[in-house]
Image: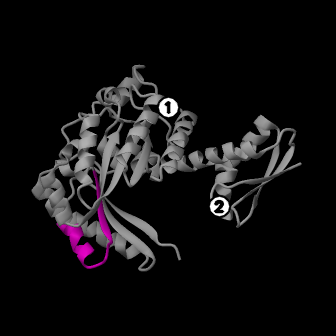
């Protein structure tokens, strides 16, 4: 049976971060309003463990939101110590956190290692300094490079997060960011299209016509190129698209941008559309398209979008069939 990984999300919103990135309203992004204490960590992990399977799973406590290593180191230690108790008892298998690249130094990394942190994710967002400046990130690409070099001196799993559609960004700059990230050789990557969140400076820019968000189609097309680029270089992309919270999905927190509850599915489906089109022969009016059974939903597309698009744009009636001998994204077509 396949081992499944579960993250127990512990949001530490905006603590320790003096910057106001144009896209950031951590309270809305994380759905969290209050500061987190060690008691909260115990309660969150304890409640989650009651709902998770006891076998064939890997469980990690995940400190997300804000800039974890920007809070005072004694407070970091207090929160990490609470999670570490579950790590020592074998209730969880790892501790991960996200932070800024300019909040990494040897003292911090020594402390994270002491408390059993296994994965560090850096919010890179862009490797183009002009985009970072336009987004008021408060760090540079050089800060990213230096942080990565330091982290790689330790036995941490390294994750890098990038965003697309930031102010001043272009597809070319995002692809450049991906190339620069690949050179840094992270273990994992996340790709986040920029969403315009209520009560952010980006919302003001959008409402005054100074910022144009990506459309869903634009964001999907770019994310597709990025995903394929990372995969080609054997870098695992663990998320494409911002994970929805109740605040984002239900309370109107997203003002504009390529928000979609199944964004990665759209990207994967677009990849399949391109593959299928490459297999169809000229003059084909009807086709049986064979894919691995586990890949059917991606080949069909969200709300059957690939089937509909093939009919509208190619005038081909496509039936998706299964073949267990086919690998992921391997397609076989029979045209009529």
**Vertical placement of residue 193 versus 110, above or below:** above
Instruction: Tell me the crowding category of disc 2: few under 14, some 14 to 19, or many 20 or more residues within 10 angstroms, Cα based.
Output: few
At mark 2, the secondary structure is loop
Instruction: Tell me the crowding category of disc 1: few under 14, some 14 to 19, or many 20 or more residues within 10 angstroms, Cα based.
Output: many
Nearer mark to the viewer, of 1 and 2: 2
**Vertical placement of residue 124 versus 151, above or below:** above
* Residue 229 drawn at (x, y percent): 51, 44
20 displayed left or right of 335: left
Residue picked out by circle 1: 214
Give 301 or 290, whichever is nearer the viewer.
290
Is residue 256 something that shows in the picture? no
Q: Earlier in the sequence, mark 1 or mark 2?
A: 1
107 displayed left or right of 211: left
Residue picked out by circle 2: 327
Q: Give residue 239's mark.
A: none
Is residue 279 something that shows in the picture? yes
Residue shown at 59%/49% (left/top)? Answer: 268
At mark 1, the secondary structure is loop
In magenta, the rendered stretch is 81-98
Residue shown at 33%/34% (left/top)? Answer: 199
């Amino acid at each position: 049976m396949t081992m499944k990984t579960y993250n127990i999300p512990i949001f530490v919103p905006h603590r320790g971060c003096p910057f106001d990135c144009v896209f950031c309203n951590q309270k809305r992004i994380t759905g969290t309003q209050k500061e987190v204490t060690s008691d909260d960590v115990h309660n969150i992990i304890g409640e989650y463990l009651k709902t998770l399977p006891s076998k064939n799973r890997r469980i990690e406590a995940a400190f997300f939101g804000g800039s974890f290593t920007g809070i005072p180191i004694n407070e970091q230690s207090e929160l990490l110590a609470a999670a570490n108790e579950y790590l020592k008892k074998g209730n969880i298998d790892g501790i991960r956190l996200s932070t800024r690249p300019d909040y990494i130094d040897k003292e911090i990394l020594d402390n994270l290692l002491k408390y059993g942190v296994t994965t560090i994710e850096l919010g890179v967002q862009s490797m183009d300094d002009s985009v970072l400046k336009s987004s008021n990130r408060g760090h540079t690409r050089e800060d990213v490079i230096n942080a990565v070099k330091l982290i790689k001196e330790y036995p941490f799993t390294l994750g890098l997060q990038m965003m697309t559609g930031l102010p001043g960004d272009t597809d070319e700059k995002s692809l450049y960011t991906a190339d620069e990230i690949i050179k840094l050789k992270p273990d994992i990557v996340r790709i986040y299209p920029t969403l315009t969140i209520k009560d952010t400076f980006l919302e003001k820019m959008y409402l005054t016509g100074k910022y144009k968000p990506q459309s869903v189609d634009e964001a999907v097309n770019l994310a597709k190129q990025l995903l394929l680029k990372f995969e080609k270089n054997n870098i695992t992309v663990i998320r494409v698209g911002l994970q929805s919270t109740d605040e984002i999905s239900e309370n109107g927190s997203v003002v504009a941008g390529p928000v979609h509850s199944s964004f990665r599915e759209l990207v994967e489906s677009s990849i399949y559309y391109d593959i299928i089109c490459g297999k169809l022969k000229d003059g084909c009016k009807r086709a049986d398209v064979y894919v691995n059974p586990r890949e059917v939903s991606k080949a069909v597309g969200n709300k059957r979008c690939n089937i509909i698009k093939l009919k509208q744009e190619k005038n081909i009636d496509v039936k998706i069939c299964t073949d267990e001998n086919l690998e992921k994204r391997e397609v076989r077509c029979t045209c009529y």
